[in-house]
């Protein structure tokens, strides 16, 4: 079967051009939070560079030099887009999971990591034993209070300047509820307790500007495939010192400045190269940079308003269906990005997702969204709030972004209405 790729109808004039997304006619993609569709900017950047495709950092020919330049320019563009400081490193990875694992491997000896139970597994599982996992808070203010108390406890009795390192690792926006976390406030608390803070921006960056310096955070992680650049790259941006002192994430070619004859006669490079051994993902980096450039030139406030209007339509529609219950952590009015999770009472979520795909050409996600502790807690909360005893043990998630339309949302709501 041959599929023709055409852009779906766009919701507003603001998303025409490089921020058009590709799609398949008739298919309604409401699963952006898992993987967003490809932006025209990303596809064009790849198409333009494809004829030149050659090695990166490994050749003297014109093709290779152009690819090396494109890769390093992409690093600069991505770093600038996320507000990297002059001395930060911008390390290309495979995705957010890879970026957080790299950061976990770069922790100095004795470091303690503090997270909340509301995180995606990518920000729960890489951290070493002895990490502190705070309970899921009821709201942003509670998150700030809980972090303050936990860091105060960790620092009790210590001497400033001679304390063990602490890293706080939080999400910018929940992949389950879309709710935004109070990153700037949490960063201020971390600073006050002489802790560093890493922000998992996998879900926030596709929906809102994220700037390391403005938020005063130390590290940021992002996935290209959630940011309309589906070519397998992610990024870790942040403080150079831990990264330069850590063992290389991958050992191999490109990560060394000297390799002698003896087995252990190796000097590792500093800078991003230390953690990027092997031939890098050129198109991943270039496509991510192309989307960053397109977003930097867009009216983000207008994009945000359009998305919020669609999200409100979706959530109002869900609230109006008596057999559908939304999942939430912070309450109905908390600021959130274009994600809504819910359950259909009396229906298995996997069956509902399969039904939506088979009969309505609608793609959503079902399950516990790689955030099992949070999703289970929210399912129990939804059962208590709704008073229903027939809620399923897993949930459904609809997520929107560039190219999503009122028609997409309405078609989902109409399909859900038939399941009552
Ligand atoms: C908040 C959050 N963090 C991390 C990840 C992991 O992203 P990836 O699968 O691209 O590594 C996800 C993926 O859904 C996510 O939503």
Image (cartoon, grey):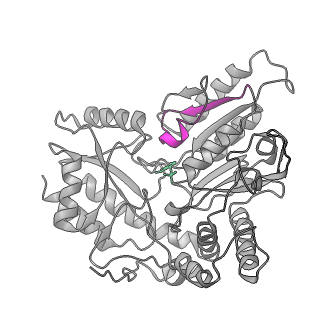
**Residue at the spot 66% in from the left edge and 76% down from the top edge:** 54
In front here: 243 or 56?
56
Residue 44 location in percent, x, y?
A: 55, 82
Residue 32 location in percent, x, y?
A: 42, 62
Residue 102 location in percent, x, y?
A: 65, 44
Q: Is residue 344 visible?
A: no
- Above or below 206: residue 321: above
Give the extent of the magenta segment: 110-127
- Above or below 288: residue 132: above
Q: Is residue 121 visible?
A: yes
Residue 137 location in percent, x, y?
A: 49, 33
**Residue at the spot 64% in from the left edge and 31% down from the top edge:** 113
In front here: 278 or 165?
278
Magenta-drawn stretch contains 336: no
**Residue at the spot 40% in from the left edge and 81% down from the top edge:** 7
- Above or below 289: residue 356: above
In front here: 264 or 402?
264
- Horizontal side of 337 relative to 219 (left or right) equals left
- Horizontal side of 390 relative to 220 (left or right) equals left
Q: Quadrant of residue 394?
A: top left
Q: Quadrant of residue 277?
A: bottom right
Q: Quadrant of residue 360?
A: bottom left
- Outermost residue to the front: 261
Magenta-drawn stretch contains 122: yes
- Horizontal side of 373 relative to 269 (left or right) equals left
Q: Quadrant of the N terminus?
A: bottom left
In front here: 13 or 24?
24
**Residue at the spot 25% in from the left edge and 37% down from the top edge:** 393
- Horizontal side of 301 relative to 349 (left or right) equals right
């Amino acid at each position: 079967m041959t599929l023709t790729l055409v852009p779906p109808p766009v919701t507003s004039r603001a998303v025409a051009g490089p921020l058009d997304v590709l799609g398949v006619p008739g298919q309604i993609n409401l699963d952006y939070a898992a993987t967003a569709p490809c932006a025209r900017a990303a596809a064009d950047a790849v198409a333009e560079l494809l004829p030149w495709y050659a090695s990166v950092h490994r050749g003297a020919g014109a093709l290779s030099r152009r690819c090396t330049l494109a890769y390093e320019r992409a690093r600069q563009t991505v770093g600038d887009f996320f507000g990297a400081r002059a001395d930060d490193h911008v390390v290309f990875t495979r995705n957010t999971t890879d970026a957080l694992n790299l950061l976990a491997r770069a922790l100095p000896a004795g470091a303690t990591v503090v997270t909340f139970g509301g995180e995606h597994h990518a920000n729960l599982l890489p951290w070493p034993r002895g990490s502190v996992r705070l309970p899921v808070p009821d709201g942003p203010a509670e998150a700030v209070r809980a972090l303050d108390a936990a860091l105060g406890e960790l620092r009790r009795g210590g001497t400033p300047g001679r304390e063990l390192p602490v890293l706080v690792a939080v999400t910018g926006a929940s992949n389950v509820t879309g709710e935004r976390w109070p990153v700037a406030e949490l960063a201020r608390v971390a600073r006050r307790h002489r802790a560093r803070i890493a922000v998992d921006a996998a879900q926030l960056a596709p929906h809102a500007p994220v700037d390391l310096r403005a938020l005063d955070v130390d590290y940021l992680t992002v996935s290209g495939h959630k940011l309309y650049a589906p070519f397998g790259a992610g990024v870790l941006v942040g403080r150079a010192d831990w990264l330069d002192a850590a063992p290389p994430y991958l050992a191999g070619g490109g990560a060394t400045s000297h390799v002698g004859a003896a087995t252990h006669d190796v000097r590792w490079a500093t800078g991003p190269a230390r953690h990027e051994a092997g031939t890098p993902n050129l198109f991943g980096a270039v496509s991510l940079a192309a989307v960053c450039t397109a977003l930097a030139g867009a009216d983000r406030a207008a994009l945000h308003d359009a998305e919020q209007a669609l999200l409100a339509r979706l959530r109002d529609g869900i609230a109006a269906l008596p057999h559908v219950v939304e999942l939430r952590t912070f309450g109905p009015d908390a600021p959130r990005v274009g994600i809504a999770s819910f359950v259909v009472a009396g229906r298995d979520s996997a069956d509902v997702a399969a039904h939506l795909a088979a009969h309505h050409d609608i793609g959503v996600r079902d399950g516990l969204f790689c955030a099992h502790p949070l999703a289970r807690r929210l399912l129990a909360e939804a059962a208590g709030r709704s008073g229903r005893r027939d809620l399923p043990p897993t949930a459904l998630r609809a997520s929107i972004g560039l190219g999503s339309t009122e028609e997409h949302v309405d078609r989902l709501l109409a399909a859900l209405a038939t399941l009552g």
